[in-house]
């Protein structure tokens, strides 16, 4: 009797979960950490390249690996905007989650990097900045290895996870031998709506930016 009740509860949970998670592609923006003003003084850097080097798979062994449908996995105009994939209660892929056109994962992470450096006391300039100080600023490059949001179905709730990993290089004491910033954010909920993808990915970027600031301050001592 107990087993039947538990099975019924699980079935109802899956139905609610599938009903809330729309099948098909969703275009949902991310709110990167709000930009901080450039400090008046401090070491100047120039963000030259923020490169998306994530590897996508058609049928990954686990949901935390970036994946897309077969037809789109080789399309950079799609992969550079993809940051999650919806799945059903039994792990079946239901649709992709992409940033709006004109936005990319690299541009979102670039903003988070800029915020992290500025909050650590660095002056940050864009690669194309015409500011005179940008011409003598130290070049910094970023290699995006991971940025992916996925769902983990549970008996009573579903958990959204995001894993981020970025490697920074530049001729700075704080970046000697490269600086790797990793972050894993998770949040539990009863059902997943489109704004939950935004919330999870946005909060993950906030934590990433904070970790970058802390690492830069620690290495600068």
Image: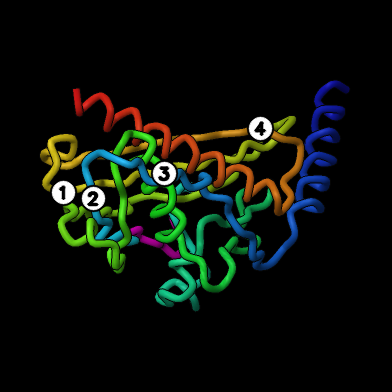
What colour scheme has been applied to the protein in the rendered image? rainbow
Q: Nearer the viewer, mark 1 or mark 4?
A: 1
Residue carrying label 1: 170
Q: Residue 45 carries which label?
A: 2
- Real-space Cα separation, disc 3 to disc 1, in angstroms: 17 Å
- Mark before the other along the chain sequence, 2 or 4: 2
Q: In this view, does 162 lie above or below 214?
A: below
Q: Is residue 170 left or right of residue 162?
A: left
What span is in magenta?
53-60
- Real-space Cα separation, disc 3 to disc 2, in angstroms: 13 Å
Quarter of the image holding residue 94?
Answer: bottom right
Identify the element where label 1 is drawn.
Answer: strand
Q: Would you say residue 57 sits in the magenta stretch?
A: yes
- Residue in the foreground of this view, choosing between 205 and 132: 132
Q: Which of marks 2 and 4 is in front?
A: 2
Residue 61 can be seen, yes or no: no
Residue 11 can be seen, yes or no: yes
- Real-space Cα separation, disc 4 to disc 3, in angstroms: 27 Å
Residue carrying label 3: 115
Residue carrying label 4: 188
- Mark before the other along the chain sequence, 1 or 4: 1
- Mark before the other along the chain sequence, 3 or 1: 3
């Amino acid at each position: 009797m107990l087993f039947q009740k538990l099975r019924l509860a699980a079935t109802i949970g899956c139905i609610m979960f599938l009903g809330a998670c729309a099948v098909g592609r969703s275009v949902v923006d991310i709110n990167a950490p709000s930009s901080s003003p450039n400090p008046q003084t401090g070491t100047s850097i120039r963000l030259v390249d923020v490169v998306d080097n994530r590897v996508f798979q058609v049928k990954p062994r686990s949901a935390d690996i970036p994946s897309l449908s077969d037809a789109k996995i080789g399309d950079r105009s799609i992969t550079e905007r993809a940051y999650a994939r919806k799945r059903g209660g039994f792990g079946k892929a239901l649709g992709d989650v992409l940033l709006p056109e004109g936005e990319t994962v690299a541009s979102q992470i670039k903003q988070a990097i800029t915020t992290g450096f500025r909050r650590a006391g660095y002056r940050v300039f864009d690669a194309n900045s015409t500011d005179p100080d940008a011409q003598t600023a130290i070049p910094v490059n970023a290699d995006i290895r991971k940025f992916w949001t996925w769902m983990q179905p549970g008996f009573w709730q579903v958990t959204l996870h995001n894993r981020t990993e970025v490697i920074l290089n530049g001729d700075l004491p704080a970046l000697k031998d490269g600086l790797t910033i990793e972050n894993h954010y998770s949040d539990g909920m009863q059902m997943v709506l489109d704004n939950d993808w935004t919330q999870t990915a946005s909060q993950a970027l906030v934590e990433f930016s904070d970790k970058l600031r802390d690492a830069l301050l620690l290495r600068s001592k």
